Image (tube, rainbow, N blue to C red):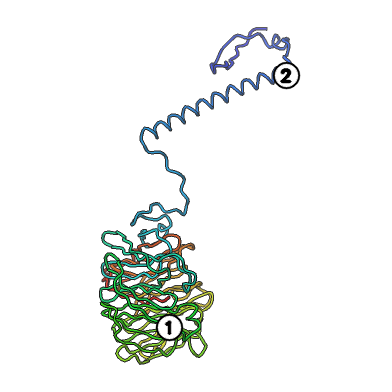
């Protein structure tokens, strides 16, 4: 028989063409033992792996060399919920899921009691338990300039500082001590503490003795109000001096001056034992001019108030859920609005409650699932967005066409609300329309 041309792969990886003996001659050759064949296969496999490892090592060295020479090491892995930056104004990863554009203002946690003026935003930060029982961390006031986006911090205040308010161009904070309430002025720019006024705590309501019933609210013009639950005082916002006072019909847990400066709204537990009571007082005389009893509200927490020009919005917990409703200034009669279907969540009804605020023009409603703006006079929705499931807005206030809010696990954020929120298509006026804040 003739010869057959066979191509083999050499150990060096080259093709070798050789004339091999005829098939019969190959069959006549002795076959190596199995042990020899196995050892030879393993030897060749080790050489192949060594070759692959060498190539990978060369590639890795080149990549490392490029990174070192450029002075920019690869960034560490990021948590999917981590902030992309900690500087004011930098976008936060979780904020990118909001339909309305949002930016981080400050990464400070434990933010509460946010108020706004035409040129500044103020808030308190620090851990203070409900009712300030066992508070050990000092509360710090913070000022934010929306134009420069710069924040400045004041000196620490008492651990149990319940609220901050603005009135007549002045900034005031409400501190709760063991036996009294202290209303202290803060410099609008430096936040340095100035003069202060001291008021006694009330023993009128046992609940106030435990939860330190304390409320502070500033309104338009020269309205600054403080209450210990059993008495209400009107202060001069320039000096803190008491101008007038009155004893309310029922215990006060929240305050909201009317935007016209003629009335003051209060909320607290209904003295008859059913739900919450919302009262309206004439500023000039301190006399009661209107009352509404909200039987659907729980007595365990104060109904939140947001005053309009001719009405007041009330939000309260009804159990696991919460609701927001409007009361007319005329006798605090309920104003009819479209009702959210039973069992459904919406801007005016939501599980875990609804927060209301009137500032910079619109009524703002936030919950664990929605953020909306509405006409405070009619309740007509102007714009709404759905919040991610992990997003929860806390205290908030608006100025200059932006809504500023405390967001759990994020800090303070700035939300660019649609122009529809401001009715006439223009950005907000920046006028301070700040609802009352309660302890």
* x and y, in percent, of residue 55 in the image: 50, 26
Left or right of 150? Residue 229 is right
Where 146 falls versus 273 (above or below)? above
Q: Quadrant of the C terminus?
A: bottom left
Q: Quadrant of residue 141?
A: bottom left
SS at mark 2 in the image = helix
Question: 401 or 90: nearer the eye?
Answer: 90
User: Dot 2: few (<14), some (14–19), or many (≥20) neighbours within 10 Å?
Assistant: few
The span from disc 2 to disc 1 (Cα, nearest Å) is 95 Å
Q: Is residue 405 above or below residue 335?
A: above
25 versus 329 height, above or below: above
> Closer to the camera, 50 or 210?
210
Mark 1 lies on a secondary structure that is loop
Query: Label 1 crowding class (10 Å Cα cut-off): few <14, some 14-19, many 20+?
Result: many
List the residue tagged with mark 2: 35
Q: Mark 2 vs mark 1: which is more N-terminal? A: 2
Q: Quadrant of the N terminus?
A: top right
- Residue 423 position in % (x across, y down): 30, 73
Q: Which mark is residue 292?
A: none
Choose between 5 and 230: the one closer to the eye: 230
Where residue 417 appears, x then y in whole percent?
34, 66
Q: How many marks?
A: 2
Q: Which residue is mark 1?
A: 229
Depth check, mark 2 against mark 1: the one in front is 1
Task: Return the x and y of residue 153 as percentages of the image width and height.
Answer: 33, 62
Residue visible at 26% across and 67% down?
Answer: 119
Q: Nearer the viewer, residue 289 or 122?
A: 122
């Amino acid at each position: 028989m003739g010869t057959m041309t066979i191509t083999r792969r050499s150990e060096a990886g080259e093709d070798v063409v050789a004339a091999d003996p005829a098939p019969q001659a190959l069959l006549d050759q002795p076959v190596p033992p199995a042990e020899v064949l196995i050892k030879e296969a393993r030897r060749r496999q080790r050489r192949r792996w060594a070759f692959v490892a060498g190539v990978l090592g060369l590639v890795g060295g080149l990549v490392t060399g490029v990174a070192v020479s450029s002075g920019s090491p690869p960034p560490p892995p990021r948590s999917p919920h981590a902030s992309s930056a900690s500087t004011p104004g930098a976008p936060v990863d979780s904020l990118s899921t909001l339909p309305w554009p949002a930016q981080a203002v400050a990464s400070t946690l434990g933010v509460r009691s946010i108020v706004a003026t035409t040129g500044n935003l103020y808030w308190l930060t620090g851990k203070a338990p409900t009712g300030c029982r066992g508070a050990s961390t000092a509360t710090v006031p913070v000022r934010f300039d929306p134009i420069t986006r710069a924040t400045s911090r004041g000196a620490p205040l008492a651990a149990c500082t319940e609220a901050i308010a603005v009135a007549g161009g002045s900034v005031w904070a409400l501190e709760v001590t063991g036996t009294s309430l202290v209303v202290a002025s803060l410099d609008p720019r430096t936040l340095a503490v100035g003069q202060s006024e001291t008021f006694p705590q009330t023993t009128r309501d046992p609940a106030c003795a435990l939860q330190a019933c304390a409320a502070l609210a500033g309104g338009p013009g020269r309205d600054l109000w403080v209450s210990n639950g059993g008495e209400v005082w009107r202060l001069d916002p320039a000096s803190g001096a008491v101008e007038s006072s009155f004893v309310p019909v029922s215990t006060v847990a929240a305050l909201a001056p009317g935007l016209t400066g003629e009335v003051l709204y209060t909320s607290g537990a209904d003295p008859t034992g059913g739900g919450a009571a919302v009262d309206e007082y004439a500023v000039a005389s301190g006399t009661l001019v209107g009352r509404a009893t909200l039987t659907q509200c729980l007595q365990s927490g104060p109904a939140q108030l947001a005053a309009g020009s001719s009405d007041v919005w009330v939000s309260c917990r009804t159990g696991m859920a919460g609701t927001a409703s409007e009361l007319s200034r005329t006798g605090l009669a309920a104003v009819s609005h479209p009702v959210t279907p039973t069992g459904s969540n919406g801007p005016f009804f939501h599980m875990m409650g609804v927060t209301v605020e009137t500032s910079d023009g619109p009524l703002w409603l936030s919950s664990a699932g929605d953020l909306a703006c509405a006409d405070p006079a009619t309740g007509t929705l102007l714009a709404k967005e759905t919040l991610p499931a992990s997003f929860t807005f806390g205290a908030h206030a608006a100025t200059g066409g932006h809504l500023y809010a405390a967001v759990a696990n994020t800090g303070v954020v700035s939300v660019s609300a649609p122009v529809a929120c401001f009715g006439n298509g223009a950005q907000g006026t920046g006028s301070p329309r700040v609802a009352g804040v309660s302890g």
